[in-house]
Image (cartoon, helix red, strand yellow):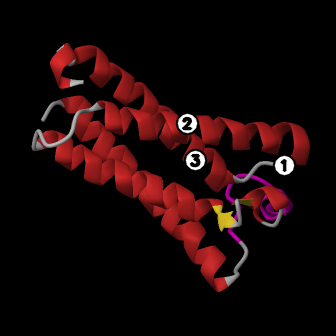
Amino acid sequence: MNNYVTAILITAAIGIVNTIYLSWCCITKRDVKCLFLPPKQCLKVQYSKYSRTMGIPNPYLGLAMLLAIIILTFLFIEAILPFWTIFAIVSAGVLFSFYFLFIQAFILKAFCTWCVLSAIVFTVLFVLSLLQMILLHPNQI
């Protein structure tokens, strides 16, 4: 296991903590605690129509993606799955994150600390995955 793979696991774990908190807020119907930003901004994002995708709360989708990334990474380490499966999910995650950042910036005109953290996590995962893809021999991808 190289440093990029280790960093992917650590970064995904950080993302899981973030999405567990957001999922807990969804389940218990509690307002998220907004760090570094006015509380109204987080609440505007949390209760907007964009907080769900096809009826599913976005934190649940993020949590599912991050859990899949961790599981697939362990399967890659054991040489059971090719790395491109991880890269595909990470790529989808970073695209969704950028889409939701766009929504926050230009439609809602409000940002949620936790959503921004999620976008940072997926961006870091994307960079790490891209670097890992570059390192791999073509038959390992």
Question: Quadrant of residue 24 in the image?
Answer: bottom right
Point out the stretch of residues depicted in magenta. Answer: 32-45
Total labels drawn: 3
Q: Using residue 37 as the reference point, say whether residue 8 is left or right of it.
A: left
Residue 30 visible to the viewer = yes
Disc 3 versus disc 2: distance between alpha carbons?
Answer: 12 Å
Asked whether residue 129 is drawn in magenta, I would say no
Residue ID for mark 2: 94
Tag shown at residue 117: 3
Q: x%, y% of residue 123? A: 51, 33
Q: Using residue 42 as the reference point, say whether residue 70 is left or right of it.
A: left
Question: Quadrant of residue 4 in the image?
Answer: top left
Which residue is rendered at x = 62% and y = 41% of the image?
97
Q: x%, y% of residue 107? A: 89, 43
Q: In this picture, is 29 found above or below 126? A: below
What quarter of the picture does the C terminus occupy?
top left
> Which element type, helix, strand or loop, lies under badge 3?
helix
